[in-house]
C-alpha cells in the first residue's frame, strides 16, 4: 500500500524474488514526497558510527546493482550515477575536522569509497573560502520521477500489478495476504492514532529544477543546499525544511531565496532558467530513522515509513530487509528502526 519509494522498491524486490505482488496507490505514483526533484543519495559523515549509518552505507553500496537491474527490466533509465559529492571547507577548523574524517572514512566505509580533502575551483563548484573541498566518492544521484517510473515498469514486466486510484471513484481493492503499509505522512498519522502515541510527522520541503547541462559533475553540498546534476540536462536544488505551512504543494518566497542561494553558490546556475518548482511533505519519524517491521497488534501487516530526506538512498536496503521479513520470516531490521 503506497506508491512512494519504499513501497515501490519493496514491491519490486518481492516481485523479483517470485512473490505475487499488488501495489495499490490511492492517488498516483510519486504523489507524495517521492515525486520530488532532488535525488541526492549522500551518506552521513563517517564518524560517531551507529546502526543507521551502517544500514545507509550498505544501501548506498547496493544501489548501483539494484538500479542497474531495474533499468534492465524496465527499459527506463532511473538516472542513477555514482559521481561523488563536493563540500567547501569554510575555515581552518573545518579543514582540520575534514582531515580527521579521512582516516575514519577509510575504516568505516571499509575501503569501498573515499573521503578526501582537495584543492580546486572551476565553473561548477566556484570558490571555497579556504580553497579546499571535501570530495567523497560514495555519494550518487538518482532522478526521483524517472526512478519511480522505472520501478513501476519493472514490477509490471516481472508479473506484478500496480494500481493507481487517481481520478477513480471506486474504492481501492481490499488488500489480501501480507500487507506492507508504505503510506508516508498519512501512514505516520494512522500509526500514531493506532498506537496512541506520536511516531512521526510531516516536514514540508521545496525544491527547484534548472535547465543546465552538467550530467558528469559531482553533486554539491554548500551551506545546507543540495545541488544535484541529472543526466537529462537539468540540475535540481533543494530543499527547505518547514514545520509550519498552509499549503502542502505551494511554493513561495522560501524557494525563491533557495534559488538565489544556488545561483550564488554555483557559477553554472547563475543565468540558468528555472523550469520546475516543487513542494511536498516528507514523512519524518520521531526517531529520525526509518520505521520498519511488523505493525504492532496487526497480524500480517507491516510498515515501511519515515524515509524523510534519505528515503531514496535507503530504499535498496529497506526493500531487501522487508522482503526477507515478509517472504522468508528472516528479521534483519536494526533495533533502532523497529516499531514497539
Image: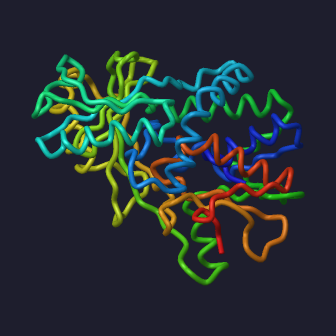
* Residue at image coords 46%, 30%: 113
Place of residue 262 in the rendered image (x, y in percent of width and height, measured from the top left): 23, 35
**Quadrant of residue 103 in the image?**
top left
Place of residue 231 in the rendered image (x, y in percent of width and height, measured from the top left): 45, 19
Q: Is residue 223 above or below residue 229?
A: below
Q: Is residue 319 above or below residue 266?
A: below
Place of residue 69 in the rendered image (x, y in percent of width and height, measured from the top left): 70, 24
* Residue at image coords 26%, 40%: 98
Quarter of the picture holding the N terminus: bottom right
Q: How many marks?
A: 0
Residues 149 and 96: in front is 96
* Residue at image coords 73%, 74%: 296
**Quadrant of residue 155 in the image?**
top right
Quarter of the picture holding the C terminus: bottom right
On screen, residue 191 versus residue 34, left or right, reads right
* Residue at image coords 58%, 43%: 30
Q: Given the current orientation, which residue lies at the most extreme bottom position? A: 196
Q: Is residue 83 above or below residue 199?
A: above
Place of residue 22 in the rendered image (x, y in percent of width and height, measured from the top left): 82, 46
Residues 250 and 265: in front is 265
Amino acid at each position: 500500500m503506497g506508491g512512494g519509494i519504499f513501497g515501490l522498491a519493496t514491491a519490486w524486490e518481492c516481485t523479483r524474488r517470485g512473490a505475487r505482488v499488488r501495489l495499490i496507490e490511492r492517488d498516483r505514483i510519486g504523489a507524495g514526497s517521492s515525486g520530488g526533484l532532488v535525488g541526492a543519495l549522500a551518506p552521513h559523515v563517517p564518524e560517531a558510527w551507529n546502526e543507521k549509518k551502517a544500514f545507509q552505507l550498505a544501501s548506498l553500496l547496493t544501489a548501483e546493482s539494484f538500479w542497474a537491474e531495474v533499468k534492465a527490466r524496465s527499459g527506463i533509465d532511473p538516472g542513477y550515477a555514482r559521481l561523488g559529492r563536493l563540500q567547501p571547507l569554510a575555515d581552518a577548523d573545518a579543514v582540520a575536522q575534514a582531515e580527521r574524517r579521512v582516516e575514519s572514512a577509510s575504516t568505516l566505509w571499509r575501503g569501498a569509497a573515499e573521503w578526501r580533502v582537495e584543492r580546486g575551483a572551476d565553473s561548477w563548484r566556484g570558490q571555497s573560502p579556504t580553497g579546499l573541498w571535501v570530495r567523497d566518492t560514495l555519494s550518487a544521484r538518482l532522478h526521483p520521477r524517472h526512478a519511480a517510473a522505472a520501478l513501476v515498469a519493472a514490477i509490471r514486466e516481472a508479473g506484478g500489478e500496480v494500481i493507481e486510484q487517481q481520478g477513480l471513484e471506486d474504492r481501492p481493492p481490499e488488500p489480501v495476504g501480507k500487507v506492507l503499509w508504505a503510506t508516508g505522512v498519512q501512514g505516520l498519522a494512522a500509526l500514531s492514532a493506532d498506537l496512541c502515541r506520536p511516531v512521526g510527522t510531516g516536514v514540508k520541503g521545496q525544491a527547484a529544477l534548472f535547465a543546465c547541462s552538467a550530467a558528469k559533475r559531482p553533486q554539491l553540498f554548500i551551506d545546507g543546499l543540495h545541488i544535484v546534476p541529472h543526466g537529462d540536462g537539468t540540475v535540481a536544488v533543494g530543499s527547505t525544511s518547514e514545520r509550519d505551512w498552509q499549503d502542502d504543494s505551494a511554493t513561495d518566497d522560501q524557494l525563491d531565496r533557495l534559488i538565489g542561494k544556488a545561483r550564488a553558490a554555483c557559477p553554472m546556475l547563475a543565468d540558468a532558467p528555472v523550469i520546475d518548482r516543487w513542494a511536498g511533505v516528507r514523512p519524518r519519524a520521531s526517531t529520525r530513522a526509518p520505521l520498519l517491521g511488523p505493525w504492532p497488534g496487526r497480524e500480517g501487516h507491516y510498515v515501511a515509513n519515515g524515509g524523510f530526506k534519505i528515503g531514496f538512498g535507503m530504499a535498496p536496503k529497506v526493500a531487501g530487509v522487508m522482503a526477507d521479513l515478509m517472504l522468508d520470516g528472516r528479521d534483519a531490521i536494526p533495533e533502532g528502526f523497529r516499531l514497539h
